[in-house]
Image (cartoon, rainbow, N blue to C red):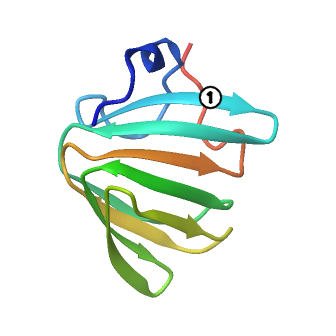
Amino acid sequence: MSFPDFFDSFPAIDVPFPEDVVGTRAIRSDQGLVVFFTFHRDMDLPMHAHGAQWGSVIAGEITSTIGEDTRVYRSGDSYSIPAGVLHGAKIKAGTRVVDVFQEADRYPLKA
């Protein structure tokens, strides 16, 4: 399932990965950041930590480690990552995810 075309009018975010690997569109408020990720290629997301995060897999597959727990998430699955907990993932090409970050400034918006 693709995201609707009107999402293309949302700004992208500045992430440390090439745009041919992952595409982004975002909506930010003072209270948080919502990001629509589209993974064009397989990607390994290194272990890291930040403020709280919630996400839902729209399409594709993610193998994610959150703390000591490793699980496979597929379309319709959601996950919650408490603030400060180490997490990382292996994400398959074609995966689409919606992530909500507690930190409104987790990633800067691109102009």
Which secondary structure, mark 1?
strand
In this rendering, the answer to whether 4 lies above or below 15 is: above
Between 43 and 93, the one nearer to me in the picture? 93
Residue at 67%, 61% in the rendered image: 52
The three-letter code of the residue at mark 1 reads Ile
Query: Which residue is tagged 1?
Result: 27
In this rendering, the answer to whether 18 lies above or below 44 is: above
In this rendering, the answer to whether 48 lies above or below 104 is: below
Residue at the right extreme, as displayed: 30
As drawn, is 47 to the left or to the right of 49? left
In this rendering, the count of numbered labels is 1
In this rendering, the answer to whether 60 lies above or below 33 is: below
> Residue 23, how many percent across, how many down?
35, 31
Residue at 32%, 37% in the rendered image: 38
Between 98 and 50, the one nearer to me in the picture? 98
Between 94 and 42, the one nearer to me in the picture? 94
> Residue 96, how many percent across, how many down?
33, 43
> Residue 9, how many percent across, how many down?
49, 12
Residue at the bottom extreme, as displayed: 68
Residue at 21%, 37% in the rendered image: 40
